[in-house]
């Protein structure tokens, strides 16, 4: 029995060591640069600056892989997403859009062509939904332009900041599309006014940084990219210092409650918290608050 216990202990140690070393070297992607600028804060940068960070097939799939990985990485508590180069993103890579329509046109049968198109749209939706469903708060920093698919992406984030030179466009109608990977579902929840949402989505008109702040598309406007990144990182650091059990349950419940009745949302948080009230984070936080001894350290979660 003792030797079995020793074996189990040893294996557990190896397993935890493996997780730790994995977490301290973030996975890299062809189109995304991932770094850990502060403890428990992961920075994901769209990294196709020479192509204005447009979303091609590789970037869609990298986003999904990256956010699924961060969701499961206990070292990661908060994610900041921004773009390298002169702007956040010019939206979908139009070249890849042409290739996708050409591939569809090769399929003769209308039913099978429809199925191909449906699968493509659904797969692409999942890449943005991975950002929303990542249980770690995601803070988006927009500089320069954020067009089309970029708006789909940032509306799946939890918090948005921008620079004074930023501008936004729900540009899909300009390329003959009804936005189909999230903007029409999430933008109304972000900015509240149905009238403004419809105007932006029907007209594809530009929204400058000042208006984005006024309508609540972003929470704060900073003078330039460095200040915006610094602001996002220090907010991320503050969030990362809190109990990850509490922060992640908060995100889970906000997400769940978005399209539910208050009663359903309350039931959901009661079910989550019947577990989380037993977490050591709660007693640690309560003792620290009572003794005014500052924020305690929390185990990764
Ligand atoms: C199921 C999928 C659903 C998803 C749908 C998503 C839809 C969308 O995202 S709609 C939005 C699509 N994007 C656009 O229409 C933006 C087009 N680009 C521009 O308006 C301008 O480039 C921009 C204002 C962003 C920047 O202008 P600037 O003068 O600074 O640069 P340019 O000289 O125009 O561009 C530099 C090179 O980048 C190429 N490029 C720009 N945007 C795209 C793009 N979206 N896709 C592919 N390539 C793009 C541009 O052609 C220039 O290339 P080169 O001439 O080779 O230097």
Image (cartoon, rainbow, N blue to C red):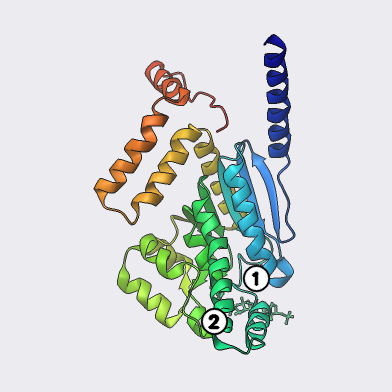
- Out of 221 and 297, give the one closest to the viewer: 297
Question: In the picture provided, is 50 more to the left or to the right than 61?
Answer: right
- Nearest to N terminus: mark 1 or mark 2: 1
The vertical placement of 170 against 130, above or below, is below
Q: What residue did someone put label 2 on?
A: 114
Q: Is residue 243 above or below residue 59?
A: above
Mark 2 within 8 Å of ligand 1, using the beta carbon: no
Residue behind label 1 places its C-beta within 8 angstroms of ligand 1: yes
Identify the residue at image location x=32%, y=36%. 270
Q: Where does residue 114 sit, x and y in percent of width and height?
A: 54, 81
Residue displayed at 63% across by 90% down: 108
Check the picture and name the quadrant holding the C terminus: top right
Of residue 214 and residue 125, the one placed in the foreground of this image is 125
Rendering coords of residue 15 (x, y %): 70, 30
> Which of 211/252 is in front?
252
- Residue 99 image-quadrant placement: bottom right
Which element type, helix, strand or loop, lies under badge 1? loop
The disc placed on residue 54 is 1
Instruction: Give the x, y percent position of residue 128.
Output: 54, 61
Asked if marks 1 and 2 touch (Cβ < 8 Å), the reply is no
């Amino acid at each position: 029995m003792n030797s079995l216990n020793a074996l189990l202990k040893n294996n557990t140690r190896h397993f935890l060591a493996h997780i730790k070393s994995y977490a301290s070297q973030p996975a890299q992607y062809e189109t995304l640069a991932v770094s850990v600028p502060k403890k428990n804060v992961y920075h994901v940068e769209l990294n196709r600056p020479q192509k204005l960070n447009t979303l091609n097939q590789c970037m869609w799939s990298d986003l999904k892989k990256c956010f699924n990985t961060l969701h499961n990485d206990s070292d990661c508590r908060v994610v900041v997403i921004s773009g390298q180069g002169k702007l956040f993103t010019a939206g979908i890579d139009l070249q890849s859009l042409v290739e996708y329509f050409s591939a569809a046109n090769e399929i003769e049968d209308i039913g099978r062509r429809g199925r191909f198109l449906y699968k493509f749209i659904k797969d692409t939706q999942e890449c943005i939904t991975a950002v929303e469903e990542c249980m770690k708060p995601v803070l988006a920093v927009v500089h320069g332009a954020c067009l089309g698919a970029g708006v789909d992406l940032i509306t799946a984030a939890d918090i948005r900041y921008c620079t004074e030179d930023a501008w936004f466009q729900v540009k899909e109608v300009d390329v003959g599309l009804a936005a189909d990977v999230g903007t029409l579902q999430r933008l109304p929840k972000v900015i509240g006014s149905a009238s403004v949402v419809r105007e932006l989505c029907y007209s594809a008109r530009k929204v400058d940084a000042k208006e984005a702040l006024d309508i609540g598309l972003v929470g704060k406007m900073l003078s330039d990219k460095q200040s915006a990144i610094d602001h996002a990182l220090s907010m991320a650091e503050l969030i990362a210092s809190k109990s990850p059990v509490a922060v992640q349950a908060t995100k889970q419940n906000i997400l769940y409650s978005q399209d539910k009745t208050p009663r359903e949302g309350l039931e959901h948080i009661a079910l989550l918290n019947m577990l989380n009230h037993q977490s050591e984070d709660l007693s640690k936080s309560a003792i620290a608050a009572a003794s005014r001894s500052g924020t305690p350290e929390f185990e990764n979660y």
